[in-house]
Image: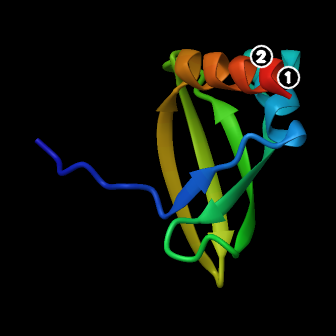
Amino acid sequence: MGAFAMPVYMLEFTPKTIASLLSPAAIEGSLVDLDVYDRQNLELKLEAKGQRLKDNPEMFRITTLYNGVSNEHDWNFTILRESADRSRKKK
């Protein structure tokens, strides 16, 4: 059994991220743009890409690239979409 690795970023539910997660493109498995920030430095905003996994559609992979280092982490797609929808309703 592998160890759980925390992502190096936090997902930010900006209008761009919300629209991306709720888009038909995300549902279909296309690559979408997301906003994240560095977990260790909350002032450092990062760009990220996300994509629903074709072989496991319940999972959504978020990939960041910063200083030449790539970080990938898989999230539950349903939970991300529900969180994005709640954030959209609050704004």
Looking at the rendered structure, the secondary structure element under dot 2 is: helix
Q: Is residue 32 left or right of residue 5?
A: right
Q: Position of residue 60 (x, y in %)?
A: 58, 31
How many numbered circles are shown?
Answer: 2
**Circle number at residue 85:** none
Say if 64 sits above or below 80 in the image: below
Q: Which residue is mark 2?
A: 28
Question: Crowding near pointer 2: few (<14 within 10 Å), some, many (20+)?
Answer: few
Residue 84 is drawn in which quadrant? top right
Q: Which residue is mark 1?
A: 25
Q: Residue furthest left?
A: 1
Task: Check disc 2 and give the amino acid type.
Answer: Glu
Q: Nearer the viewer, residue 83 or 66?
A: 83
Say if 73 sits above or below 31 in the image: below
Residue at (57% x, 22% y) in the render: 77
Give the CA separation, mark 1 to mark 2. Answer: 5 Å
Where's the C terminus, which quadrant?
A: top right
Q: Is residue 85 left or right of residue 77?
A: right
Determine whether label 1 and label 2 are within 8 Å by CB. Answer: yes
Q: Position of residue 22 (x, y in %)?
A: 80, 20
Q: Nearer the viewer, residue 7 or 30?
A: 7
